[in-house]
Image (tube, grey):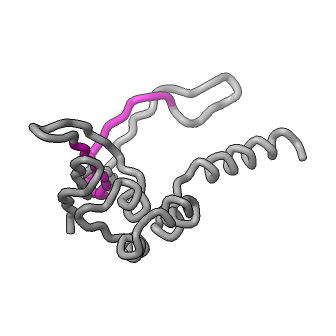
């Protein structure tokens, strides 16, 4: 196998190996000791992808995955932690644009002249939003919110 074909294969394998499983079942298979350390009622909730009050962070990780952001803090009596899960929503817009540049036609002596480009086409932009948040106090879930 040549180096040219070996490099894309190696990069693809590396990208797949770096991925965290996207489902509760996949995370349970990847972290069986973490799952076995939970009580039976929490194991059932994790398998269903649900969380409840008094769950530890390990159970929330198995149920919902790795958070996009973590915020550590404290109140009058204890340490607090918040996990935020982000999502993105596609928004289609129409854009009228003008571009000036070189022509795409390349002759034997280089590019020929400037090119003017007018475009009126839909564009898709992804807007981030807060999908869910989980609050912990002393290592246990105190509350959570999830968008519908």
- Direction from residue 81 to residue 57 in the image, left or right: right
Q: Position of residue 147 (x, y in %)?
A: 21, 64
The answer to whether residue 121 is seen in the rendering is no
Q: Which residues are magenta?
A: 80-102
- Direction from residue 135 to residue 44 in the image, left or right: right
Number of callouts in the render?
0
Q: Residue at x 64, y 51 (%)?
A: 17
Q: Residue at x 21, y 36 (%)?
A: 73
Q: Position of residue 80 (x, y in %)?
A: 21, 43
Residue 89: within the magenta?
Answer: yes
Q: Main secondary structure of the magenta part?
A: strand
Residue sitting nearer the eye, 74 or 147: 74
Q: Position of residue 74 (x, y in %)?
A: 17, 36
- Direction from residue 110 to residue 5 in the image, left or right: right
Q: Residue at x 12, y 38 (%)?
A: 75
The extreme top residue here reads: 109
Q: From the viewer's perspective, is residue 65 above or below residue 5?
A: below
- Direction from residue 7 to residue 119 in the image, left or right: left
Q: Residue at x 34, y 43 (%)?
A: 118
Residue sitting nearer the eye, 111 or 27: 27
Q: From the viewer's perspective, is residue 145 above or below residue 126?
A: below
């Amino acid at each position: 196998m040549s180096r040219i074909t070996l490099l894309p294969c190696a990069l693809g394998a590396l990208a797949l190996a770096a991925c965290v499983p996207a489902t509760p079942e996949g995370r349970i298979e990847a972290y069986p000791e973490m799952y076995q350390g939970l009580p039976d009622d929490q194991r059932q909730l994790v398998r269903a992808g649900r969380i409840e009050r008094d769950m530890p962070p390990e159970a929330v990780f198995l149920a919902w995955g790795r958070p996009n952001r973590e915020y550590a803090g404290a109140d009058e009596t204890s340490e607090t932690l918040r996990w935020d899960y982000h999502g993105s929503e596609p928004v289609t817009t129409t854009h009228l644009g003008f571009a000036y540049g070189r022509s795409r036609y390349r002759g034997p002596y280089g590019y020929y002249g400037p090119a003017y480009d007018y475009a009126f086409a839909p564009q898709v932009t992804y807007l981030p939003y807060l999908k869910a948040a989980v609050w912990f106090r002393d290592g246990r879930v105190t509350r959570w919110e999830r968008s519908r």
